[in-house]
Amino acid sequence: MNADIRSGRLDPDTIGENFSELHKPLTELQAIQESARCLFCHDAPCTEACPTDIDIPGFIRKIASGNLKGAAKTILSENIMGNTCGNVCPVEELCEQVCVKNTAEEKPVMIGQLQRYATDLVLENWIQLFRRAPASGRKIAVVGAGPAGLSCAHRLAMLGHKVTLYESRDEPGGLNEYGLAAYKMLEDRAAREVAYILDIGGINLETGKTLGEDFDLAELRRDYDAVFVGLGHNTVKALGMKNEAVDGAYNAVDFIELIRQEDLATLPVGRNVVVIGGGNTAIDMAVQIKKLGAETVTMVYRRGFEDMGATDHEQQVAQTSGVLIRTHAQPHRILAAGGQLTGVEFEYTEKDGNGRLKGTGETFVLAADQLFKAIGQALDATPLEGDEKPELIGGRIKVDEFQRTSLADVWAGGDCTPGKDLTVTAVQDGKIAAISINEYLNHG
Amino acid sequence: MADLRCKIAGVSSPNPFWLASAPPTDKRYNVERAFEAGWGGAVWKTLGEDGPPIVNVSSRYGSVDFYGHRMMGFNNIELITDRPLQINLDEITAVKRDWPDRALVVSLMVPCTEQAWKAILYKVEQTGCDGVELNFGCPHGMSERGMGAAVGQVPEYIQEVTEWCKLHTSLPVFVKLTPNISDIRRPARAAFDGGADAVSLINTINSIVSIDLDIMAPTPTVAGKGVHGGYCGPAVKPIALSMVSEIARDPHTRNLPISGIGGISHWRDAAEYISLGCGSVQICTAVMHHGFRIIDDLVDGLSNWMDEKGYATLDDFRGAAIPNVTDWQYLDLNYKTVAAIDQDKCIDCGLCHITCEDTSHQAIRAEKDVNGKRTYTVIDEACVGCNLCYLVCPVPKCISMNEVDNGLPYLNWTEHPNNPMK
């Protein structure tokens, strides 16, 4: 049997339409009306829920008064990637989840959309809201130009320090550039935001430079006054099964990156597709391959809906996009013929008396032309090796509340440290680390 | 269904809702559309003396918007009708002929001479209209020429012109009052003394609704310049209600019929004016915002409310609120209310707390448990019963103001021990 994989299952116009942004930007009228819905709460629950502590009622009131520049500054002062976050934050489990309008009207204020509205203004018109403090004479190395590294670098630059920002890829942005679903974030927007961040000055970006290959941590600690490590996830988890490398089997993150970077009409798309995983990456993969024209897309998760890492909102997006979500089944065998994927055999699961997941022994097979694995990513700490390396915890770099690692002059943040793997938390980590580094440099 | 028929100063209409003298009543076309929609009456846009037509400017209206709501306040710099007198007279004649059951009153403004008023009254009488309304109120343009508010601000002129009109016409005479004075009772008394059959109020208020900060000029802007205009719309209702109440309570004018005007948008507004003694009510901004079809809810809403309250006719509640409008010195200083928050309805916005804390009496406690659950409670001893929390709370019926039975008798300022003048 030959696998049915080909590009251009849909005509380019349809693909273009499918990949237009999930949320259209608010119109001026919508922004006026939506901002008027905000009650300007005292001790606002939304601000409390925001990982970056944005004064949400404050910026919304500024939108309402027509002070968009002020609104943007309120946002970006706390979260320099506030534009991206307005688009991709899981607001349904952060700020918007606790909006008092849920209780009052069963409909929160569209905080994410308003945040994007205000910040679009400064990005589109290139209004630079931040200035560097007088030069401190200090140099800091930031490793990884993803959200954590960019946030850290920007704040350090603002504080007057000189930053060298190392990035192993050809372009900065990290997951914002390579990892976010294309229909959530058009690529030029991510690049524009990064350019805006770098525009503050004082940040020397070195792309194509990889920690552990082109330089090591010891060198950085020797050459710089402080180091921030924002490696993100640099490896994906494997199923550990036979046939995992056959043609037609992919790591979802690799394919998502292709979607962000390549011409959509040229991507290989299977007729029948299986996605394994229950997180937002699995959803992003399933939705996008469906949007590219796959005939059937089945997302299979070993536990129940309630255990999924993907939010309810994400699950709904998948389901309304035509993705079939099957739960309580784990991959058992990857089926292949002639080095080509033909299907995946799954085993039903249930919880044992201790709440642990176990297979029931009963299986079923899903025929598949393509398999996407989205069972998680991890930190490969090998690049940190050396005489002294920061302590790890649970496979990630251990940090304290100020993002300090076990090494006095090394800070870390983002997905390589414990905590939620969100753009917004990475930005906060970078900001906190920069403030801590500044304290350290000024007061030792 | 309640009987909404209305009679004021001898003028009858099937309901109390009249269009005020304004752009919507400038032409037969508009007035007939209003009558088709169900309006009870109309006051035709002000006619002037025969002669060269009035010239109006381009860019005539300005608005006060509030957090996305348009036209909370509205103003205009338009003058009286700019169409030839005879055309207006012919159209008024035709409308009255075709709509005999509707009230059709004609607004007038001519120079302050007996001859001018006599001449126009004679012509207007021929139309078969039900009454005339003397426009002593327009605050812009015409007042610079000695008419409108220039007359309305001088009680002696009001009385004199009213007397001329009563002398030269048998039609009911409504005198429209300007609010741009310090004590509305004085012009009302002058109208009464001059023999007016009714007063209409309020006319528009002197206003600049906004400054265009790009060109540094008032709006509406005419070739870079602006002037004060006449302010109306929902924002002016409180001012108008107060003035109506003063005339209704004044022993001198107690029985003078009033046609209420100012910010009426909904049936409830109309009911409030009628409760303060108004016969008919006049509406303009609301139709300029939404069109004539709002009459459906005005009629329907008023009627349903009257049915609910057991009022069969407008007279059943007309003036019912007047006895309860008093002077501050007669308020019961022993009366006490305290706020209460219904915790089941509270959505935790905290506005009651922060406004009381920042701007009032520190009478609402804010607490937060370990799970972040907020609780706002009233500190009864600190609460003065000011209503602020009740007013800022966005949730209907969440905060109530409850009377406290303190067992103390009625005590007003005139009898209060702290009153040095007692």
Image (cartoon, rainbow, N blue to C red):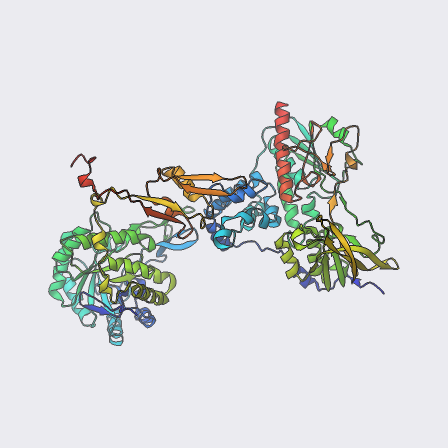
* A235 relative position to B12: left or right: right
Q: Position of residue B10 (x, y in %)?
A: 17, 67
* A198 relative position to B27: left or right: right
* A219, above or below B198, in the image: above
Quadrant of res A163: top right
| Residue located at (77% from left, 34% from top) | A384
Residue B51 visible in image: no
In this view of the protein, which residue sits in the foreground, A108 or A128? Answer: A108
Q: Position of residue B344 (x, y in %)?
A: 45, 50
User: What is the residue that sits farthest to the right in this orientation?
Assistant: A338
User: What is the residue that sits farthest to the top in this orientation?
Assistant: A444
* B249 relative position to B379: left or right: left
Quarter of the picture containing the C terminus of chain B is top left
User: What is the residue that sits farthest to the front in this orientation?
Assistant: A353
Q: Position of residue A99 (x, y in %)?
A: 52, 48
In this view of the protein, which residue sits in the foreground, B311 or B59? Answer: B311
In this view of the protein, which residue sits in the foreground, B95 or A179? Answer: A179
In this view of the protein, which residue sits in the foreground, B221 or B273? Answer: B273
| Residue located at (36% from left, 38% from top) | B360
Quarter of the picture containing the N terminus of chain B is bottom left
Q: Position of residue A240 (x, y in %)?
A: 82, 49
| Residue located at (16% from left, 36% from top) | B421
Residue B3 visible in image: yes
How many marks overall?
0
